[in-house]
Amino acid sequence: MRALILLLLLFAPSISSGQAFDPLGVPAAPASGAAYDPYGRWEQPREVIDRDVKTTRLLSVTDGTPLYEAVPPPHSTPATESRMLPIIQGGVLPLQAGPKSPFLPGTNLRFEYHYLINFWRTYPEAKVRGAPPPGHVPPALSRDALRDTGGAPPQVVDVLFRQASALYAEVIAIPMIRRSQGVMIRPSLRIQRRSDEAGTQVYGFVLRIAAPELGGGGHSVALEICSNCVVNYGPAWGRYGRTQVVFLNPLAAFVVASDRPTHISEYRNGGGKQIPNPAFFDPARPKTDIQVLTVTPQAMDSRQARWAGQGAMAPDDPYARMVAASFIPDWRAAVDHLNGPAAPRAQ
């Protein structure tokens, strides 16, 4: 593992400080003693080769909000119209977006959502242009948000509600969520009993943080946080900061807090493809421990999700905020704390 980290340090892309991408800070093992998924798709590191392109000039930063030069017609996308992003000259693509996105460290996979996450890390106090009305953000998760207990015993419900409340607090601590504009944050919580193929049962929750527009109706963007979801998708593709990345319609932050791998070889001799571990959940741990966590941004439609990956989305779009909120918190630290020795547990 140390040799791998040294290799990543040697080949890690060097990006200008204005558009920082920090692939470091990944420990050999989390503080809890649980192992990162050993079946992550690590490959030869690749260098970002487009770091010297010319972009539109930054004109000013007012009240925490950047203003870049306008892109001349006929080029236009929500990303260019916002004038919040540096746009590569002669086109509509933001810096380090779309096919020019940085690679996930140690992989040959470009992480196409970096430009949105990096914007809110660089300008956490940025405001929505056009002065929409202030939104509403509940300061804490209320019991009224609990929609379904899944038949779990009261002590289990209490533990899972405390866990969900702590993760809700992580989300609303992000300035662009806490100072919501034009949307109303509406959390809801469901508790479910889950089991792997080996029959080990655990409890988990789905915390959905929706952000419907003020005065709007119908569907809304959301952030969905799921603890102890059954692992039925492919192995993690790599790490962005301290968080692994999996692709679930279209992406999710992914924390494994178990000593058991999420995937194993199809055959006992180690051959074949990697399949979900049928005995992933550890029966020796309390049933309320978080053994795996996914944090998934949810778009209103496929077009919105596609724009985000193509580099066409403005960072102040509600879905762009949910993408950023998926990767800004340190989910690894939060899960380790909730699984810590002093944390309440229930069977």
Image: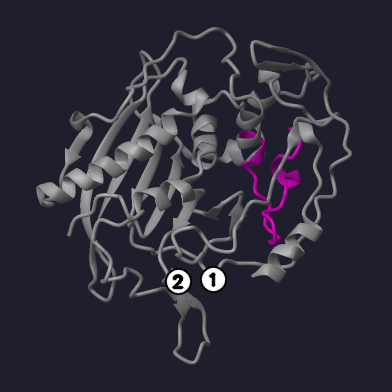
Please report the bounds of the magenta region as a residue range. Answer: 94-116
Query: Majority secondary structure of the magenta segment?
Result: loop
Residue 14: percent from left, percent from top = 81, 46
**Dot label at residue 261:** 2
Q: Nearer the viewer, residue 284 or 190?
A: 284
Q: Residues within 10 Å of mark 1 (few under 14, many from 20)?
A: some
Q: Secondary structure beneath disc 2?
A: loop
Q: Nearer the viewer, residue 59 or 55?
A: 59
Q: Residue at x 35, y 49 (%)?
A: 338
Residue 166: percent from left, percent from top = 35, 38
Q: Is residue 112 magenta?
A: yes
Q: CA distance from mark 2 to mark 1?
A: 7 Å
Q: Amino acid at mark 1?
A: Pro
User: Disc 2, disc 1: CB below 8 Å?
Assistant: yes
Q: Residue at x 47, y 54 (%)?
A: 254
Position of residue 25 in the picture relative to residue 347 (left or right): right
**Dot label at residue 38:** 1
Position of residue 96 in the picture relative to residue 336 (left or right): right
